[in-house]
Image (spheres, rainbow, N blue to C red):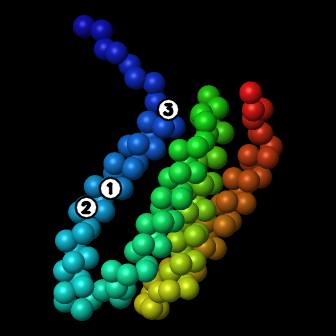
Amino acid sequence: MHKKTVPITIGFVCRRLSIAALMVGLAATPMLAQAQTTGHAHMSAGDAPRDMHGSMMNMQQQMDSVKASGDIDYDFAVMMRIHHQGAVDMARMELAKGKDPQMKAMAKEIIAAQEKEIAQFDQWIAQHKKQQH
């Protein structure tokens, strides 16, 4: 029997990641509801989740707009750079609006680590620039 192979594209990977993120979000909803009713939630259902969601949607749109180059290394660097910037954006929102000292400390660590890696991706991408056709 001959198996049909499906080419893996950036769009395919992004759709799979979106599905995984949706599943994680659906699994987390009961925990968030429980935390809110038991007083363990540090944010309301107001601004912060909408801002985080907007940040995630922006990151997803940027990733969806990237066209596969055919070079897995280059595509990895470009996509991970976008992903890391999304993490930095979310961490900055935590610093601006968060209340929990532990989460704010983690946000600072995330920003430092992700910005260092973004700089590494930027350097690598600049050295391996792909020609647009």
- Residue picked out by circle 2: 26
Instruction: Of the two numbered discs 3 and 1 on the same chain, state the one appearing first in sequence.
Output: 3
Q: Quadrant of the N terminus?
A: top left
As drawn, 48 above or below 57? below
The spot of residue 70 in percent (x, y) is 62, 28
What residue type is disc 2 on? Leu
Residue located farthest toward the right when viewing the structure as drawn:
127
- Residue picked out by circle 3: 9
What residue type is disc 1 on? Leu
For label 1, the SS is helix
For label 2, the SS is helix
Indicate which disc residue 22 carries.
1
Q: CA distance from mark 3 to mark 1?
A: 20 Å
* 93, 122: nearer the viewer: 93
* 73, 50: nearer the viewer: 50
As drawn, 88 above or below 126? below
Asked whether, in this view, residue 48 is left or right of residue 83, the answer is left
Q: Quadrant of the C terminus?
A: top right
